[in-house]
Image (tube, rainbow, N blue to C red):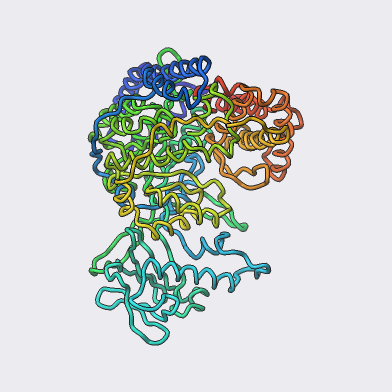
Amino acid sequence: MSERISQFGLQVSNELYQFIEQQVLPLTTYESANFWQGAANIIHDLAPRNKALLDKREALQSQIDQWHQDNDYSVETFADYKSFLTDIGYIETQVADFTVDTDKVDAELATMAGPQLVVPIMNARFALNAVNARWGSLYDALYGSDLIPAEAEQAKGYDPKRGAKVIAFAKHFLDESLPLTQGSHSDVTQYQIVDGALHATLSDGAQVRLQAPDAYVGQAQHSSDNHSYLLKHNELLIELCFDQQSPIAQQDKAQLSDVLLESALTTIMDCEDSVAAVDAADKVLAYSNWLGLIKGDLTEQISKGGKTITRSMNPNKEFTGADGQALSVKARSVMFVRNVGHLMTNNAVLDKEGQEVPEGILDAIVTSLIGSLDIQGEFSGQNSKEGSIYIVKPKMHGSEEVAFANELFERVEQMLSLPANTIKMGIMDEERRTSLNLKNCIYQAKSRVVFINTGFLDRTGDEIHTSMLAGPMTRKNDIKLTQWIGAYEQNNVDVGLQCGLNGRAQIGKGMWPVPDNMKDMYEAKIGHVKSGANTAWVPSPTAATIHALHYHQISVAELQQTLKTRTPANIDDILKIPLAESTDWSEEEITQELDNNAQGILGYVVRWIDQGVGCSKVLDINDVGLMEDRATLRISSQHIANWLKHSICTQAQVMASMQKMAKVVDQQNQSDPLYVPMAKNFDTSVAFKAACDLVFKGDVQPSGYTEPLLHHYRQVHKSA
């Protein structure tokens, strides 16, 4: 344990203390003593209430468990079940209609619609890639993905045939988004600006212009033979690039070398599910990267092709506007920082009793302190032009917990002398109690909410754990086909629109989990846009550029006006537990389900425990790379725990699957020089022990969360 510094009843780890004292406070106007006194006051006042909220979760769960032990859940007992949940306060009395009044929200959140990246803040390279993914090359995204099918025999290096398909796709996109008064962009031989509008010459000599003359925004002359035109559609910018030195331009009749799209409008820099932060050193790394992102000076050395390059944050793009005036365009995503939820504590700071303080309170204080640099001083406006700090608050259960987070943010604002509601809140709708009471949750943060988002994975994990004793769940892949999920997804949009989030905040949808499969993503993820969501999560910058195409195909702002009049989702449908209609599964089917779950658990946990990787592309049982984080782990571990509880399988069967799949995971990772095999000695593998505990002790984990066990075993590994 590192040295600790005593500050107003807090015992602060030396790493965190020195980071704040030496790297953060000197950039602010805050005195050291005032900061630590304020932090201590917040922690001493709010930590006991944080614990009381967690105790209430457990009390409600105990009552629900008892109801299921005393009653059979069925169509006949559904009314009694719903009344019971209302009586114990699990279903809240709904507040009267209201409209949120959040102000000073950046356009990227309030009025624009586009993709959102979520990246582990402890990985500087990923964070830089994400913040720079505000713009993406459509040509590169198409050429480098399976959205354009590969030829049977593709040329090495640049393949002109594949390139031609990419260009044809891009020209079709321009025809749809920026149509000409006649003809096609594929027939254009020259673009030029005439009287403040973009005109084009076609192959037959015809002179045409854009159907929407106000779509032209500006131009930039980068060099004598390199220029670009900036256009707008559905509030999103498109840059047509003309670089005569490019081989692409030399083969294009209009000398068009690339089409750049505004892509990841926003990025969530994640301190939660996608990282493995278990102690002060981990937290300081996360906070240090957040500081670099806010200051705009975060860099990372990248070795590529035998060369070392320095990756940094992109500067703004400069144009001459259609009015002849200088125009500066943002080249970086607007950043949220996702704090942890209310559950976990961290040894970075101990309270006056020597207990670890709630990590969510610590996150709020430190990330807001760093975020305040964007509000005032030399770094102001690097992230938010409107002077807001954007924090996503995950895993809250019901409106009482949102009210607590709102009060926490208010206390931090007062401590840092920030205007009221400077700290904006993103509410993750990923727990059952929040879904059922979403309107009340939004109400508790109605002056600072800027984001609600469905998280199907965590929501499914909570669904299983909450109803653990109701009966055996259907097979995991079939859960997403049951009635509650559709109602839950619709309810999120319905309630968001009812509360006036459109034009003020984001209504978001979840992650595409297969990062190498962009063709299927392109075909499926437009459903998120059609649902009325004005953002959705994507796993990579390439995916952001491809998903950006959907926001040109549909005007979300117009669609949301239509959706306001539809019949809202029914809360009864959300309450329908995804129990198996029949458990007459064969031994082969049960083994298949266990193997699939076990492989996913082990593939993720072994990297978390041994390497501190909180989110990664993990090969599934069919060797398909899937994005995995603690939410996917929560589902798989809870699903096996549920089947064990109802004797669908035995502990011996589960252990057999775990040991069998450990060998598979070892083989899948054999090319990783840092990987430590599990199957060589199951008794000494900390990662294997952690994975087994997540399953065999899954039914008693708080809300089914995986963090307590993961943190414990990661600390065991680090101490060894």
Would residue 388 be found to the left or right of residue 202 on screen?
Answer: left
Q: Nearer the viewer, residue 274 or 13?
A: 274
Q: Nearer the viewer, residue 589 or 593?
A: 589
Up the image or down, 647 lies above or below 606; here it is above
The part of the image, by quadrant, that contains residue 187 is bottom left
- Residue 626, percent across and down? 59, 45
Point 52% across, 53% down: residue: 521
Up the image or down, 326 lies above or below 188; here it is above
- Residue 267, percent across and down? 42, 46
The part of the image, by quadrant, that contains residue 102 is top left
- Residue 639, percent across and down? 59, 30
Q: Residue 345, can we see it?
A: no
- Residue 598, percent across and down? 66, 33
The part of the image, by quadrant, that contains residue 668 is top right
Q: Nearer the viewer, residue 323 or 343?
A: 343
Point 52% across, 63% down: residue: 142
Point 38% across, 66% down: residue: 177
Up the image or down, 228 lies above or below 490; here it is below
- How many discs mark residues in the rendered view? 0
Q: Residue 2, can we see it?
A: yes
| Residue placed furthest toward the front | 76
| Residue placed furthest toward the bottom | 205
Would residue 65 be found to the left or right of residue 684 on screen?
Answer: left
Would residue 642 be found to the left or right of residue 459 on screen?
Answer: right
Which quadrant, please, contains the C terminus? top right
| Residue placed furthest toward the right | 680
